[in-house]
Image: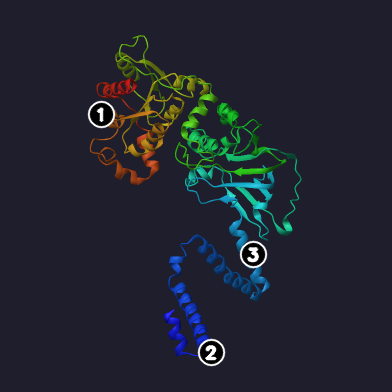
Amino acid sequence: MEYNAILAKSFSRKEQKKLSYGALLAFFVFLLTCFTVFKPSFSHLPILNSRLSINAARPRMLQIDENVISRSPRQILSTKMKLQAETRRTVCNILEPRSDYCDIEGDIRIHGILSTILFTSPQNGNIELNESWRIRPYARKGDKAAMTSTTELSVKSLVGNDRRINSVCSYTHGVPAIIFSLGGYAGNQFHDFSDILVPLFITSYQFHQQVQFLVKDFKPYWISKYMPILKQLSKYPIINMDNENNIHCYGRVIVGLKHHKEFGVDPFKSPKGYSVTDFTQFLRKAYSLNRSTAITINEGQNATTKPRLLIVSRKGTRKFTNEEEIANMATSLGYEVVVAEPGVTITPSEFARIVNSCDVMMGVHGAGLTNLAFLPTNAVVIQIIPLGGLEWLSRHDFGEPAVEMKLRYLEYKIREEESSLIEVYPRNHVVFRDPTSFSKLGWEAVKSVYLEKQNVKLDVASFRVTLVEALKLLHS
């Protein structure tokens, strides 16, 4: 009140009015200044922040509109094409280290003999541009020797004026298709699993048998050998693309197989989180294998219940030259010993059942150890590592997969006295003295000496320690 009285005395009514307007204007200037300076702090308030976002977006929207208006029709079309290219789904992935593959949806037509896949698809958007890929559908693309024997397929999208496919469908299928090759190293059991069967499981298991296989570089014996597995992945006839002159039409086709790791499955990359243990359970179902878990030896257990030991025999390279001596020593430790060689007089299904009946499996590094996938959970795998600096390869191919399959893994690295190479080369030869240096001669040299010319005569007294360790693992 005192302030108002002083103000009234000092200024006329008209002057008081002007002063009030000036004060009000100063207040708004002050408020605007505060808002500008402290805007970052205010932005943390949710309501104010949302309003600021909306208001801030308006100038940008106007700017974009102005830019579009100022551009030529060609620039507008170019921008539109770029946006469509960014939003459309990639059809073919050729950036993976081990396998190229395409996942196509739309009007797809396959000509087997010509090795061509033509398609029109919503995936193409409205871009007036034909695209094509050359795909070798075998999961070892970094290996030139393997890929040389794998047929190349042409995958081509048709858009614009070519959007109508002239070829007429001979057969129209209501399920997706997966195309893969039996070239490369198909026929070697390890490569059969690591390059084809495990990737085929990764790619096809999600379809619950509602998928059809089209095979390039067809091998009838291979199909027959693995039919129990193939039948569990697809309910439909397998099409031999090499002899197929008809046009097969699908709404979805996957060209090539997805590969995660050597003889393994990465659940983080799988379509539905499948793991390698899902693969081993799938194999048990495919071959009607009864045992899911290995024996557990308890103190005071009936002596007639013995753990079964499988010695994987080899008649070619890297064979045991004292197989009988090894079997007798294992028997003395309390094992029931089985000696068998895969793929000779035993069918794959029969050998799978033999493996599944055992609690311990031992063998020299080689394709025969691939059968560890049929062992029951918690069984023990013993890999005999020959000379040649093969420790890393042995663990990579079989040691790591065994652990991921929930098996117990042991290894025994032989000494020079246990290798047949001692009869071929002097002790001071680089083959013994420096395998790493010898490996610089290339894989063919390593393969020729350490894998193809080497047999193993185990020192049974020394190896006995490893078999005792396996028994201890079966106690736990």
Where is residue 141 drawn, in percent x and y?
A: 50, 46
Check residue 417 in the rendering and tell me which mark sits there, or answer none. Answer: 1
Locate the C terminus and report the quarter of the image it occupies.
top left
Three-letter amino acid code of the residue under disc 3? Lys
Residue 80's tag is 3
Q: Between 281 and 412, which is closer to the camera in this rendering?
A: 281
Q: Residues within 10 Å of mark 1 (few under 14, many from 20)?
A: few
Residue kind at label 1, given as amino acid type:
Glu
Q: Reading the chain from its start, which is encountered first: label 1 or label 3?
A: 3
Q: Nearer the viewer, residue 213 or 224?
A: 213
Q: Who's the residue at 26% across and 32% down the image?
A: 416
Q: Position of residue 395 (x, y in %)?
A: 36, 36
Camera-side residue of 142 and 279 = 279
Q: Along the horizontal axis of the image, is 325 left or right of 266? A: left
Determine the CA span between mark 1 and mark 3.
72 Å
Q: Is residue 50 above or below residue 244?
A: below
At numbered mark 2, what does the secondary structure look like: helix, strand or loop? helix
Q: Secondary structure at mark 3?
A: helix
Residue drawn at 35 percent across, 46 percent down: 441
Position of residue 350 in the picture relative to residue 366 (left or right): right
Image quadrant occupied by the N terminus: bottom left
In the rendered view, tell whether residue 52 sits above or below residue 100. Answer: below
Q: Is residue 59 above or below residue 385?
A: below
- Depth check, mark 2 against mark 3: the one in front is 2
| Image spot of residue 91 (x, y percent) | 60, 51
Marks 2/3: CA–CA distance? 63 Å
Residue that label 2 marks = 14
Rate crowding at label 2 as few (under 14), some (14 to 19) or many (20 or more) other CA atoms within 10 Å.
few
In the picture, the disc for residue 272 is: none
Give 365 or 307, whichever is nearer the viewer: 307
User: What's the residue type where badge 2 is placed?
Assistant: Lys
Label 1 element class: helix
